[in-house]
Amino acid sequence: MRKQTNLDRDPLGTVQPLSLNVVAGGAGFIGSHLCRALLDRGESVLCLDNLQTSRPSNLRALEGQPRFRFLRHDITQPLPSDLLRLAPRITRVWNLACPASPPQYQRDPEHTMLTNVVGTNHLLRLAETAKARFLLTSTSEVYGDPEIHPQAEDYRGNVSCTGPRACYDEGKRAAESLAFDYARMGRAQVRVARIFNTYGPNMDPGDGRVVSNLICQALRGDELTVYGDGSQTRSFCYVSDMVAGLMALMEAEIDGLEPVNLGNPAEMTVNELLGHVIALTGTRAPVVHRPLPVDDPRRRRPDISRARALLDWAPKVPLAEGLEATCAWFAAELAAEPAAAGAAG
Ligand code: UDP
């Protein structure tokens, strides 16, 4: 059983009245950086998280802040009355609640689907009641294994509704449908971000993503796992750039009736990423090839023209800089928690 933390015991009633943000999934990788950035901007944050794949340690640095509260809650369940009572104070509802790594979201596919559909609906209703703006973090996975390259928002995707990734990508597509229906019906102001692969500090070492796996394997001297022949591509965005994009999108005075891609267009193969990690860490560990997961997209790269035009946003952190910071963070993390180390495959 998980140990109780101070976060669990925090009351809700003392949250400051101004600019109250509800951040669902706020203990997760991107969510925890978003909570920090909102607090740094002087706002109040109520973080909701079921701690399924996220980590209380991501919130340690925020715990003592008077404008921050944590509530352990699974958004597939009706929102607690304590939270609903705060509705008049809530100005922004952010939905970042869902495991995003394939091995994690495939572990309980029913729950993944319900988190995206039922959970998103609970949060949309909260935004409607509170007259708050709502932001959904959708995903590049809505493009599936894309037939056009790079992917712009008007591409409708090549997604399998029967495969093992469907619980996530079809779940996110349904969540987008719900959000845009609320927007069209005038029930809530919505913003939908389609997030492409993101990396940085606060990733879970056991998450199973390629960046966290390769860095943790290199730091431990374990075999470096490449799925397939490593020629598949991804485009990796550093987390501070992603959070800046999400905040710009939430505040943008747009009609919100279209999704916006957020990601770094610098595309590379998994083999190229591996080369960067080897150069950075100096590891001499062997590379092993594992089967390519079912429905693993061959190529992925965001077209961010819309984000540039609407938000005047583009990523700033080059891969070398971001990987170095991420590596340093993982090194400290693994040194501090040797028992918890163990990258998933
Ligand atoms: N991958 C890999 N080795 C790993 C983990 C992932 O080669 O240890 C591959 C995976 O098959 C995919 C790419 O790296 O082609 C990105 O995987 P990740 O899970 O990070 O993100 P997603 O597939 O959701 O884009």
Image: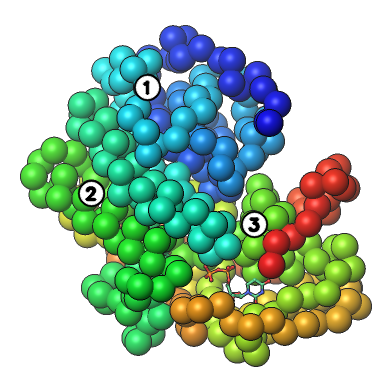
Query: Can residue 341 be spotted in the picture?
Result: yes
Q: Earlier in the sequence, mark 1 or mark 3?
A: 1
Residue that mark 1 sits on: 80
Q: Earlier in the sequence, mark 2 or mark 3?
A: 2
Q: CA distance from mark 2 to mark 1?
A: 21 Å
Residue 184 in the image, given as x and y percentages of width and height? 10, 49
Select label 2 or label 1 by which is in front: 1
Image quadrant of ligand 1 equals bottom right
Query: Can residue 33 be spotted in the picture?
Result: no
Q: Amino acid at mark 1?
A: Pro
Q: Going 32% across and 24% down the picture, which residue do you hit?
A: 90
Q: Is 282 situated left or right of 277 in this image?
A: right
Residue that mark 3 sits on: 207
Question: Viewer-proximal residue, 330 or 205?
Answer: 205
Residue lying at the far top in this picture: please name it.
Answer: 14
Q: CA distance from mark 1 to mark 3?
A: 29 Å
Give the structural element (helix, strand or loop) at label 2.
helix
Q: Going 46% across and 26% down the picture, which residue do you hit?
A: 46
Residue that mark 2 sits on: 179
